[in-house]
Amino acid sequence: MRLGVIDIGSNTVHVAVLDAVRGARPVPQNSQSMDIRLMRFLDDDGSISPEGVETLKNAVKEAAKVIKKEGAESTLAIATSAIREAANGPEVLDELSKLAGVPIEVLSGADEARLTFLAARRWYGWGVGRLLVLDIGGGSLEIAAGTDELPDVAISIPLGAGRMTKKFLWENDPPTANEVADLKEYVRHKLGGALGNGRLLKGDHVVGTSKTFRSLARLAGMPRHPFGAGERYTMSLANLEDWVPRLCKLSSEDRVALPGIGPRRSRQIAAGAIVAMETMRALKIDQIEVCPWALREGVLLRHIESLGS
């Protein structure tokens, strides 16, 4: 089956077309991303502004065109925290579903964590033992851990890189020392309330997914080649701690010159780095490996398994 996927996130609308067969690895045919950075368009009451709605509509229209051109037989559409928590989210979703041609599934934070964990488990296999997975999106941080395909614990915390940038680091570029300090204090407070004693949030193998971790690992990590396939990165807490103050002293324009930091995420990478650093500290993680599969792959795996069932 040729399958189209529309993934509406906080930073991008991503469209992918894949040939999917139950029991086999999906074969990509086309993949494109449209920049939206929704946090720019949130009004004081939490609504997505008219300009933001138009940006979303244009991106979903383009995604639907790609899927039609590639001849997909079926389409999946998902949305995550930015839409889920917007004051006018239901109305926006109705409009976007019409453009996508299918109902858009709005994932809960816990579902995001579980599906991301599923993707990481399939990528690494059973041999790594208990797995701990971290994912920093634009709107939320997901953490999951377990020994099986579904995690024992899956939590979502509203500490996304875009959300924290808009809340703490938006007025000044680069941010002031006080703004950075306030963000760090806020992240520690939110983590403390959500993680409790963290007893179940342990892993024999610790991985990070999402573009934020990939960008940070290219900047502050080291490449490695596990299983002899492709360039991959590990990142230590010590290296990340070294980079955080430097990132915070640079403007978003200057950050683009750094390895792994593109213009789409240069404004929010400092907040993402702080969230990553404080999370690793809270969970006593010394090193993390970046996994190439994340939420989108988890959604695909779940759907493919349902084919013919």
Image (cartoon, rainbow, N blue to C red):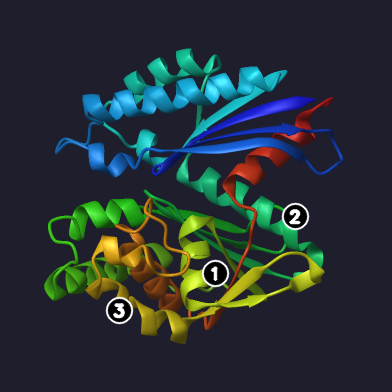
Give the residue drawn at x 54%, y 14%: 101
Quadrant of image for the C terminus: top right
Camera-side residue of 34 and 161:
34
Mark earlier in primary sequence (2, 1):
2
In the rendered image, the residue lying farthest to the right is 23
Mark earlier in primary sequence (3, 2):
2
Give the residue drawn at x 55%, y 19%: 65
Q: Label 3: which residue?
A: 246
Give the residue drawn at x 80%, y 64%: 126
Mark earlier in primary sequence (1, 3):
1
Q: Report if the CB atoms under discs 1 and 3 are less than 8 Å apart.
A: no
- The three-letter amino acid code for the residue at tag 3 is Arg
How far apart marks 3 and 2 lie (CA) works out to 36 Å
- The three-letter amino acid code for the residue at tag 2 is Arg
How far apart marks 1 and 3 lie (CA) works out to 29 Å
Q: Is residue 54 left or right of residue 155?
A: left
- Binning the other alpha carbons within 10 Å of mark 3 as few (below 14), some (14 to 19) or many (20 upward) gives few
Q: Report if the CB atoms under discs 2 and 1 are less than 8 Å apart.
A: no
Residue 213 position, x and y percent, is 49, 64
Q: Label 2: which residue?
A: 122
Q: Is residue 203 left or right of residue 163?
A: right
